[in-house]
Image: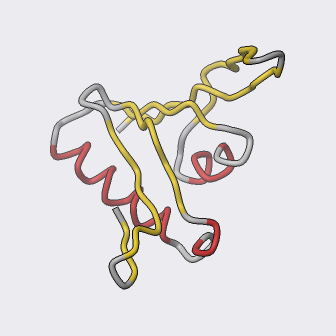
């Protein structure tokens, strides 16, 4: 979790199986390197836990970020919610 003056500006979560479930940076604090610093800490923790790979279901906005961190697309995911087609990509990175 990243805080600025006691206010949460971002967070990233990792399951015990190595799946990144949530990555969030407040819109007023994006493009300042916060997500990269959070991700680097997460990857260090994953390596300490001896995880062999990380996975994430990345949106079209998050996909370039994770590609820059060394993730590759495994498959495209599509679902429909309330008549809206949703798309993301399962990505993984071998550690």
Q: Is residue 74 left or right of residue 16?
A: right
Q: Is residue 53 left or right of residue 9?
A: left
Q: Residue at x 24, y 30 (%)?
A: 16
Q: Residue at x 26, y 43 (%)?
A: 46
List x then y, in percent, for residue 86. 75, 24
Q: Quadrant of the N terminus?
A: bottom left
Q: Residue at x 26, y 54 (%)?
A: 44
Q: Quadrant of the C terminus?
A: top left
Out of 41 and 4, give the one closest to the viewer.
4
Q: Quadrant of residue 17?
A: top left
Q: Quadrant of residue 7?
A: bottom left
* 74 up-or-down from 70: above or below: above
List x then y, in percent, for residue 85. 81, 20
Q: Is residue 72 left or right of residue 19?
A: right
List x then y, in percent, for residue 69. 53, 52
* 88 up-or-down from 29: above or below: above
Q: Is residue 15 left or right of residue 10?
A: left
Residue farthest to the bottom, as pictured: 5
Out of 67 and 14, give the one closest to the viewer.
14
């Amino acid at each position: 979790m990243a805080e600025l003056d006691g206010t949460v500006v971002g967070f990233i979560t990792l399951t015990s199986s190595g799946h990144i479930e949530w990555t969030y940076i407040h819109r007023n604090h994006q493009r300042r390197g916060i997500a990269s610093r959070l991700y680097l800490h997460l990857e260090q923790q994953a390596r300490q836990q001896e995880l062999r790979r990380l996975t994430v279901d990345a949106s079209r906005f998050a996909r370039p970020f994770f590609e820059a961190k060394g993730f590759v697309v495994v498959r495209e995911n599509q679902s429909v919610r309330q008549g809206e087609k949703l798309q993301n990509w399962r990505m993984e990175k071998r550690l």
